[in-house]
């Protein structure tokens, strides 16, 4: 009966990848009276034989500044003056409702308007109260409605205003740059608990998706083909390099990062997350390894592993173990889901840590509204009987 169940799992797994990747989808197999697997041995010396590398490409449009002009939003500060009347000069802030209140005028809706459009709206309103057509000067003095998040191992993590087109390099530079080896040694000698950035797993989240930016190529090799232009609400995160952890995500009771130890396997990692949820599809457990721009994915038939009918897979530091709720047919789509889930979880933890460590630093750090990131309360582990 066990062999029959694993045979069904093998048939479902075979539909995950095209025939040229059939090795990737093999399940349990009977050889010489013992069960073995095409999956990686318990202590692999190199990449597992059923590993596929996915090359994620940068869209050409991401390397160009947005042609759209700056638009106003709540919190933006403007200096407004009616030309010929110096006494009318005033600093005005766009209200939370997106309206501009200037002198005796009623609120003018400027949310989403350009500076030129806001100027025209003001002139039209003022013209109702004066004989000659007024001319208005508007100067942008402060930006609050357009911001980006730069967190992690940079000199000055935080939230930064974005008043003009900005590249990823410019954003990292604005945050003081990454923590270099010399910085790290100085801080370590001073007893400051900071670590260098892990460029292979650094990422940019845009509207809930991870852009395939190779930070190592950009920052260490000066490859400007990775220097994408950022958009408002983009979330840039550079994690710690020395932390030896494995991430367990998806259909597990408590998605979390766990400390890596020699000999840790997929089964051990899932057990550390208190097991799988009801309905988890355990034939297609993914192990993602390597950089986020060129990740490697290995599919493990976890169902056969826990039955003792297949060898477990040994993990390495920074591996991502993902348990899905349903089978996936296209490997490219599957790895996008895994990476986006990982990045969202890391971003939430980074934002929470920043707020906790710096509770009095301005208004704190907020998860961007347009990022697709949501905060999920932690699940209490089940009692141990």
Image (cartoon, rainbow, N blue to C red):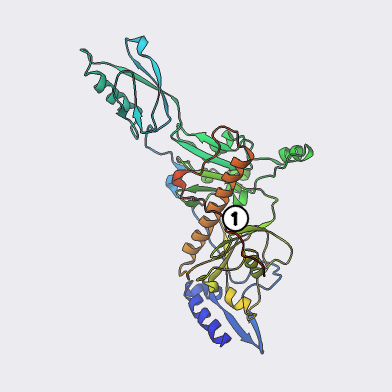
x and y percentages locating residue 124 in the rendered image: 24, 22
x and y percentages locating residue 252 in the rendered image: 56, 65
Is 197 situated above or below 11?
Answer: above
Which residue does the image show at 34% across and 24% down from the upper left?
101
Is 377 situated above or below 288?
Answer: above
Is 355 situated above or below 310?
Answer: above
Quick check: 85 left or right of 132?
A: right
Residue 214 seen anywhere in this rendered image of the structure: no
Is 7 situated above or below 197?
Answer: below
Which residue does the image show at 47% across and 51% down from the upper left?
208
Instruction: Name the quadrant containing residue 137.
Output: top left
Residue 88 seen anywhere in this rendered image of the structure: yes
Quick check: 382 left or right of 127?
A: right
Which residue does the image show at 60% across and 37% down from the upper left?
359
Q: Which residue is mark 1?
A: 291
Between residue 26 and residue 321, name the one nearer to us.
321
Crowd class of label 1 (few under 14; some 14 to 19; many from 20; radius 10 Å): many
Between residue 120 and residue 292, name the one nearer to us.
120
Quick check: 242 left or right of 63?
A: right
Tell me the SS state at disc 1: loop
Q: Hey, which residue is sitting farthest bottom in the picture? A: 33
Quadrant location of the C terminus?
Answer: bottom right
Label tally: 1
Between residue 255 and residue 183, name the one nearer to us.
255
Quadrant location of the N terminus?
Answer: bottom right
Between residue 95 and residue 39, name the one nearer to us.
95
x and y percentages locating residue 23 in the rendered image: 56, 75
Q: Hey, which residue is sitting farthest right in the picture? A: 189
Which residue does the image show at 64% across and 70% down from the upper left?
267
x and y percentages locating residue 115 in the rendered image: 35, 27
């Amino acid at each position: 009966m066990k062999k029959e169940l694993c045979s069904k799992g093998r048939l479902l797994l075979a539909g995950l990848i095209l025939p040229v990747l059939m090795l990737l989808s093999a399940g349990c197999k009977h050889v010489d009276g013992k069960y073995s697997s095409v999956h990686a041995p318990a202590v692999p010396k190199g990449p597992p034989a059923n590993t596929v590398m996915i090359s994620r490409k940068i869209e050409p449009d991401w390397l160009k500044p947005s042609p759209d002009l700056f638009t106003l939003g709540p919190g933006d500060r403007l200096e407004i003056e009616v030309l010929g009347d110096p006494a009318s000069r005033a600093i005005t802030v766009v209200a939370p409702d997106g309206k501009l209140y200037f002198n005796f005028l009623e609120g003018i809706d400027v949310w989403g308007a350009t500076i030129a459009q806001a100027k025209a709206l003001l002139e039209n309103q003022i013209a109702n109260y004066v004989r000659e057509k007024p001319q208005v000067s508007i100067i942008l003095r402060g930006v609050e409605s357009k911001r980006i998040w730069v967190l992690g191992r940079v000199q000055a993590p935080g939230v930064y205003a974005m008043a003009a087109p900005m590249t990823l390099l410019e954003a990292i530079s604005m945050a003081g740059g990454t923590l270099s080896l010399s910085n790290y040694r100085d801080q370590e000698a001073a007893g400051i608990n900071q670590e260098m950035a892990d460029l292979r797993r650094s990422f940019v989240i845009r509207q809930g998706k991870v852009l395939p930016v190779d930070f190592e190529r950009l920052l260490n090799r000066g490859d400007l083909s990775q220097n994408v232009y950022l958009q408002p609400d983009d979330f840039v995160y550079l994690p710690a390099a020395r932390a030896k952890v494995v991430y367990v995500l998806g259909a597990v009771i408590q998605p979390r990062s766990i400390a890596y130890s020699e000999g840790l396997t997929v089964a051990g990692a899932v057990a550390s997350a208190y097991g799988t949820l009801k309905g988890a599809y355990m034939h297609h457990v993914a192990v993602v390894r390597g950089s986020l721009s060129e990740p490697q994915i290995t599919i493990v038939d976890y169902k056969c592993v826990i039955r003792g009918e297949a060898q477990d897979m040994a993990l390495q530091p920074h591996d991502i173990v993902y348990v899905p709720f349903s089978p996936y047919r296209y490997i490219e789509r599957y790895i996008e889901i895994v990476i986006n889930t990982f990045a969202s979880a890391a971003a939430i933890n980074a934002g929470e840590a920043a707020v906790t460590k710096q509770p009095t630093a301005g208004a704190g750090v907020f998860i961007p509204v347009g990022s697709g990131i949501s905060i999920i309360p932690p699940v209490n582990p089940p009692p141990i009987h």
